[in-house]
């Protein structure tokens, strides 16, 4: 799947919300309210054969009656009804669908899945889900979720295979005023999977880092290829529950594989949330005003070499910094950047040197 194929899904100009529940508190009604309340700029088009309006928005009885072709359709109907609806959407020209299902987990839907995918593939329509939550892109004022928690815009994208985990991180972020770029709950990944989203998010300008919650990987080779490409341009943090003792070899292989492609694995929700907080609060650093402070010239030179190869540049010590740092540098040591305090430097020396360097106008960070 090309990244372009996901444009209708994640940057739609219009959205149809399809349901048949006549109740005011249905999933479809909540989705329409969330889209309107988020300030979605495109048309919101409810489809419901039993209602004239949904959450105050004019509803249409059939997909064929819609006044325009929706880029994205959100289906809240039972999955068994999705085949005909997908075919109707394809005939209308819709290119993407999000399946939100409240049906019990663990049902054997293999035959139904194949019928839905066949209907979608026949008209070039891509499917996200089925899932119980949905997805959101706060920067585009797109809240296509059934969450009742207000969303905050940020630069971290979160992709999960669990709607419960997504609910948890939305609530956690709201309490701490931490926002997100994309919140995507993959669900059963009948069509669009984690590999496709890594390809998309790696190129997405508003995403500075990617967090994943994974329980299984359907296509390991495709996943690792996409993960390698994404990790080259932005941090990718993975939380994956450890399996049983009998699967320890598989876990070791997984750890080695993701480490080789540049992903970082955490082993608890606490560490996962802490990663979100650290990435959300950190700021990108200028590449040309950096100091390295340590207690070994050789280690400092290695760090400086890594910095240079990554496109960074060491700052030059100003005359004022040289004068003030002089008393902290052991006799016979060169006063240069990287700054070597010697192996006997204590906390007080590091504290004083760090303070002096950060006060230097040439410094962006140390």
Image (tube, rainbow, N blue to C red):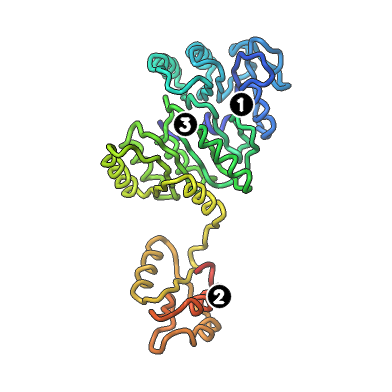
Residue visible at 66% across and 10% down in the picture: 50
Residue visible at 42% across and 48% down in the picture: 266
- Identify the mark nearer the N-term, 3 or 2: 3
The residues tagged by marks 3 and 1 sit, at their Cα atoms, a distance apart of: 21 Å
Disc 3 is placed on an element classified as: loop
- Identify the mark nearer the N-term, 3 or 1: 1
Q: Is residue 13 above or below residue 19?
A: below
Q: Is residue 221 left or right of residue 37?
A: left
Q: Is residue 112 left or right of residue 167?
A: left
| Residue at which label 3 appears | 186
Disc 1 is placed on an element classified as: strand
Q: Is residue 353 above or below residue 194?
A: below
Residue 147, located in which quarter of the rendered image? top right
Q: Nearer the viewer, residue 58 or 241?
A: 241
Residue visible at 38% across and 48% down in the picture: 263
| Residue at which label 1 appears | 14
| Residue at which label 2 appears | 355
Residue 323 at what x, y percent from top left?
Answer: 52, 86
- Identify the mark nearer the N-term, 2 or 1: 1
Residues packed near mark 3 inside 10 Å, few (<14), some (14 to 19) or many (20 plus): many
The residues tagged by marks 2 and 1 sit, at their Cα atoms, a distance apart of: 53 Å
Residues packed near mark 2 inside 10 Å, few (<14), some (14 to 19) or many (20 plus): few
The residues tagged by marks 3 and 2 sit, at their Cα atoms, a distance apart of: 46 Å
């Amino acid at each position: 799947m090309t990244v372009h194929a996901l444009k209708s899904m994640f940057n739609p100009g219009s959205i149809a919300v399809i349901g048949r529940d006549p109740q005011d508190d249905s999933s479809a009604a909540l989705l329409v309210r969330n889209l309107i309340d988020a300030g979605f700029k495109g048309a919101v088009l409810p489809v419901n054969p039993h209602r004239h309006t949904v959450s105050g928005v004019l509803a249409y009885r059939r997909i064929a009656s819609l006044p325009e072709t929706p880029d994205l359709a959100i289906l809240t109907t039972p999955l068994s009804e999705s085949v005909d609806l997908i075919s109707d959407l394809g005939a209308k020209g819709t290119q993407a669908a999000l399946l939100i299902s409240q049906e019990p987990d663990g049902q054997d839907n293999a035959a139904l899945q194949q019928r839905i995918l066949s209907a979608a593939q026949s008209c070039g329509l891509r499917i996200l889900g089925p899932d119980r939550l949905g997805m959101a892109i706060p920067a585009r004022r797109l809240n296509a979720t059934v969450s009742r928690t207000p969303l905050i815009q940020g630069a971290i994208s979160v992709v999960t295979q669990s709607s419960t985990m997504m609910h948890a991180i939305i609530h956690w972020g709201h309490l701490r005023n931490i926002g997100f770029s994309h919140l995507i709950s993959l669900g059963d990944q009948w069509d669009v999977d984690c590999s496709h989203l890594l390809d998309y998010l790696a190129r997405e300008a508003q995403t500075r880092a990617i967090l994943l919650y994974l329980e299984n990987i359907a296509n390991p080779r495709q996943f690792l290829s996409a993960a390698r490409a994404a990790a080259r341009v932005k941090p990718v943090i993975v939380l994956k529950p450890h399996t049983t003792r009998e699967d320890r070899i598989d876990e070791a292989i997984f750890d080695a594989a993701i480490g080789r492609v540049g992903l970082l694995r955490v082993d608890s929700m606490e560490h996962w949330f802490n990663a979100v907080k650290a990435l959300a609060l950190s700021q990108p650093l200028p590449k040309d005003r950096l100091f390295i402070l340590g207690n070994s010239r050789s280690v400092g030179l290695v760090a400086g070499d890594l910095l240079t190869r990554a496109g960074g540049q060491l700052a030059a010590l100003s005359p004022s910094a040289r004068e003030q740092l002089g008393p902290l540098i052991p006799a016979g040591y060169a006063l240069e950047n990287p700054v070597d305090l010697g192996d006997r430097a204590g906390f007080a020396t590091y504290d004083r040197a760090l303070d002096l360097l950060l006060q230097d106008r040439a410094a962006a960070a140390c």
